[in-house]
Image (spheres, rainbow, N blue to C red):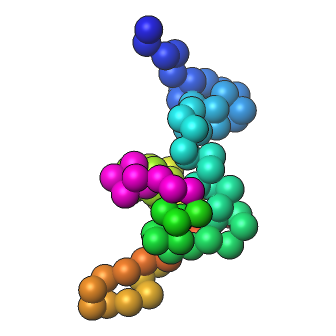
Amino acid sequence: MKRTSFAKWPCSIARTVDLLGDHWTPLVVREAFYGISRFDEFQQELGIARNTLTDRLRLLVDERILEKRQYEAEPPRYDYVLTEKG
């Protein structure tokens, strides 16, 4: 069954539900709210697969819920912090 998209609806609640529709995304946001900011910390706290976490972090950065900030150059490593929108 295909899920109805609320991405274009004029209601902010409907758009948020559309964005947070899977069960991992709100959990990643929750952990960021509690102060988790590094990939390995998210993975450890949630027990989430690396590829799934990568996808959710990318989505949240693309939607400007999280901001990606580099904290190490070699190898490149990033913090993920909530934005004002987040």
Locate residue 20, reporting x and y percent: 59, 39
Q: What's the magenta bit mostly, secondary-structure-wise?
A: helix
Between 44 and 60, the residue placed more toward the observer is 44
Residue drawn at (57%, 32%) of the image: 21
Number of callouts in the render? 0
The x and y percentages for residue 82 are: 62, 65
Up the image or down, 7 lies above or below 53; here it is above
Residue shown at 62% from the left, 71% from the top: 36
> Looking at the image, which residue sits at the far left?
74
Percent coordinates x, y for residue 38 in the rendering: 50, 74
Closer to the camera, 80 or 45?
45
Foreground residue among 38 and 70 = 38
Span of residues in magenta: 46-53
Q: Residue at x 54, y 44 (%)?
A: 24
The picture quadrant where one finds residue 46 is bottom right
Residue 68 left/right relative to 72: right
Q: Which residue is drawn at 51% across and 56% down?
A: 47
| Up/down of 46 relative to 10, above or below | below
- 29 part of magenta stretch: no
Residue 83: tell me if it is visible. no
